Structures are given as structure tokens and as C-alpha cells.
Amino acid sequence: MILGKPIWRFALLALTILLLLSLAISEPTEKEIFDDEDSEGIEELLAVDDEAEQEQETHGKFSDAEVLTKAQRIVLELNSDSAKRVIEQNEYVLVLGYAPWCARSAELMPQFAEAANTLKALGSSVVLAKLDAERYPKAASGLEIKGFPTLLLFVNGTSQAYTGGYSAEEIVIWARKKTGVPVIRVNSVTEAEEFLKKHHMFAVGVFEKFEGPVYEEFVKTATADNEVQFVEVSNIEAARVLYPDIESSGFFLGIVKSEPERYAGYEGAFEMEKLLQFLDHNKFPLVTKLTELNSVRVYSSPIKLQLFVFAKAEDFKDLHEPLQDVARKFKSKIMFIYIDIADENLAKPFLTLYGLEDSEDTVVAAFDNQISSKYLLQTDPTPANIEDFSSKFLQGSLSPYFKSQPVPDNKEASIQVVVGKTFDDIVLNSPKNVFLEVHTPWCINCETTSKQVEKLAKHFKDLNNLVFARIDASANEHPKLQVVDYPTLLFYPASDKANPIKVSAKSSLKNMAKVISKHVRSSDDAPKDEL
């Protein structure tokens, strides 16, 4: 429902007043946070937190809400005055630039707070801070925050872009790696058991001694990778807690995930580039669920063949396990991705590429990101059909998919409506000259051009070797029709359909008629040029 202007303005005013009151009541000002005179008050607040922690040890764990509330207090709230000072006074500051209305910011905020809590518990020197970039645009501009959410790490005042994942665990891993802790060392079975409780995915390296060329490549790899926690072990019993199948001799590297495909061991030479490639091909689960927060990681995966399953959550439950069995057969070659078809922000842009944006049934599609080709499974999405589709996709034997509207009835039409399925018959394979109008529904100038084409079609109606046609490029595709500007007018000579002649849509009606007459090869039936 859309509110009328008076009601809308009243609602906005009320919301603004409530927001200002809440800020005045609950948020300390920058002066209150940073003035030396109030340092005793801050210490008292911290003491309250410490007392609460002691009470937790006595009476049990905090609720999730209490933990989050405490974690959020650890994150500094920056403003125009404090942003520069906080960054200058601390060696490491990880800043989250956000906007209150941004859904991705809202999704990231609790993860960021949890990461702050974990880093504090680990004794990290990284300060986590957040800045409302909409409320403080000048400060945001000074920090070069241009979109939402934006994460930046400042090292002695110099910023670098955040390149890690967006869960609390991934933020912690990235922050520690960038501040001098690329590898965690585990010395005993007890430490290994504690490590397992805290980490869902990690790379484990086993060495007799933490020295030498092989170990150095391991540390270089740990430093270069932004997403995976590395752990090093020399105690073989502790190593087997982390990775049960480790042999007792030599050195070893493996990746562990909380997935059905839990363990993967590396068998190549210990060289950083090869180790990184191994991690890139094994860090994702067999079937990855796409979310707003992991989308960048998924899109940048080195696995360029990607198979997408769009399905309702309840339908995917039955398909998930057999799909994992299929994905296992193509591991490291095809990336399998699930998208909830009800999630319009994620599913609709993909489905629009196939003309299936309104679909509610399960859709299986594939993309080859190396050659920018797309494919569609056009049989029932059973595990057997998906496996056959995947095999042909890997072999390169699938025909690319080009979307098309249903074939229209053009019997009485003066202008033939072309769709993807009829482009060959009406345009490329026709023995006649074809004048094609390429348009889209959202094109501002297309309507004017369409009226001109209708006049031209009427003017040349008695010309037997000329066909007028139009195609909606937003709903139809063809490999031989590569158009980026709309409207576009193309004249396909009967003698050379491979080289259409572009006609300016900005030309006058008379000039368009002259161009057509010039290229039509049958002078016997040519009408006069005057309109």
C-alpha cells in the first residue's frame, strides 16, 4: 500500500523523532567516548562486562541475544570527528562502512560484531569499527567508502581492501592473517580437540620440524590465502585428531570441511601456486548455497564451469543428497550451486537470462564463464538427468541456450514478428531481403522508430522480394544477432545475409526509404521513393 503525501510525511517525521530520541538516550557521543575526563566511566562499563562474564561462569552461558549485544559494544561507532583519530591512533583498524537501509549491511552487522568479540578474546590488536556512511558522508568519502557494505583494513593509517569472506569466522581469519598470524600452531591432542570445536574449515600442515623449504612454502601459502585458516602440527597424534588418515612419515597438507566430503589431501609438489590452486578447488562444499554474503567468492571461483539449481527450499531438501552424489563425480571440474528460487534478488537476475523469471518449478542451468555461454536442462531435473547434463557440459557437447518467445502467427502481418526460434527461417535463410527492427520494451526511442518502420512496410508492401521484421531483444536471442544499442535497424541483403547493413534509426523516413531502395536488387518491382 502506498501512503498519501500527508500520511507519508507524518510517518517520516515520527520515525525521525523516534530515531533522534533513541540516539540521544542510548548512544554516547563521540566526546563521551574519547575524552580523557570520562576514562573512568569507560573503565566502569568495562568492569560491568567483566562482572557479567564472571557471573556467566557461575550461572551458565549467556543467551545468543546477550552475546550479540555484548559483542556490538566492542565495535566502535565512528563519526565525522572520531574516524580519522581512531585510525591514526591504532596500528590496525578494520572499518565497516554501512547504510541503515542496506539489507546486506544488516546481514553483515551481527557477523562483524561476533568477529570483534572473538578477536578480543584472542588478544588481537585489531580494532573493529563501523561508520554510518549515510549519516556521515564526509567521513565516508575521506575513507573512500563508496558502496554498502564496505570493509577496509587500515594499517598504520593506510587502507587496503577487504578480500575475505563475510561470516564471523572468515572475518576473524582474514584479520589475523593480515595482522601477522597466518598460521595457528597446535602442540597437543587437547589443543587439537579445542581447535576442532572452533573451526569449520581449515588447512592442516604436518611437519617434523617447522623449518626448511617445504615449510616455508606452506607459510607463504597461508599468508597469501585470505579465506582458509591454516594450522601446523608436528605431533602425529594431534595431527590425526584433525585429519585421521595422516601417515606418520614425511610432510602433509590437507583441507578439512564440515561437509560430507570432509577430507581432501594434497598430493603434489609443495609450491605456493599449486597449493593455492588445490585450496581454491576444494574450499567450497560439494553443493554451495548462494547467498548475498558469499556471492563474490562464488563468482570469483577459479572453477569456470558452474551448474545452478534453482528450486524451492522444500523441493531442494529431497534433491540435496543425490545432487551431492552427482557433484562428487565432477569435483574440482564443475561447481554446483543452489539458489532458492523464491529469493528474487539472487534468482531472478539469473532466470531472466533464460526468459524464466516467472518460473516456480525447479530449473537446472549451467554457465561456462570462460566463453560466456549458458545452457539449460530441458528435461525433468532428476539426478540421472542432471548427471548426464553435467557430463555433456564438461565434455563441451551441449548446445548453448538462447532464449525465445513462443512462435507467433505471422500470416496476416505486414511486419513479421521474429523470435529466437524463427530467426534463422525468417531472416538468415529467407531468399528475400529483410529489413529488421531490433527493439526492447524499455527503450525510450523504440516506439518512434517502430512507427517509422510501419510506414516503410506500408510504402514497400508491393515489393515481393523484401520482408519487414522486428524482434524484441529483451526476450529473444540468437548467436548471429549481437546488438547492444536500441533501436537498431539492420538490412539483410538476399545475396549476403552474413553481413547486414546498419541503417541509422535517426535518419528521416525519406532517407531510410532511399537506403532500402538502393540495396533492393529487384528494380522491376521497386516503387517510387516519395513518401
Image (tube, rainbow, N blue to C red):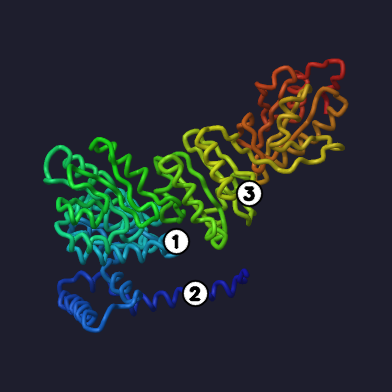
Is disc 3 surrounded by few (<14), some (14 to 19) or many (20+) residues within 10 Å? few
Quadrant including the C terminus: top right
Q: Which residue is mark 3?
A: 380
For the question of whether residue 262 can be seen, the reply is: yes
Spot occupied by residue 122 in the image (x, y as percentages of width and height): 19, 63
Mark 3 and mark 2 lie on one chain; the one further toward the N terminus is 2
Q: CA distance from mark 3 to mark 2?
A: 54 Å
Q: Quadrant of residue 3?
A: bottom right
> Mark 1 or mark 2, which is nearer to you?
1
Mark 1 and mark 2 lie on one chain; the one further toward the N terminus is 2
Q: Which residue is mark 2?
A: 13
Q: Secondary structure at mark 1?
A: loop
Is disc 2 surrounded by few (<14), some (14 to 19) or many (20+) residues within 10 Å? few
Q: Secondary structure at mark 2?
A: helix
Spot occupied by residue 251 in the image (x, y as percentages of width and height): 19, 43
Residue at (38, 56) in percent of width and height: 259
Relative depth, front residue between 461 and 216: 216
Q: Residue 102: which numbered mark, if any?
A: 1
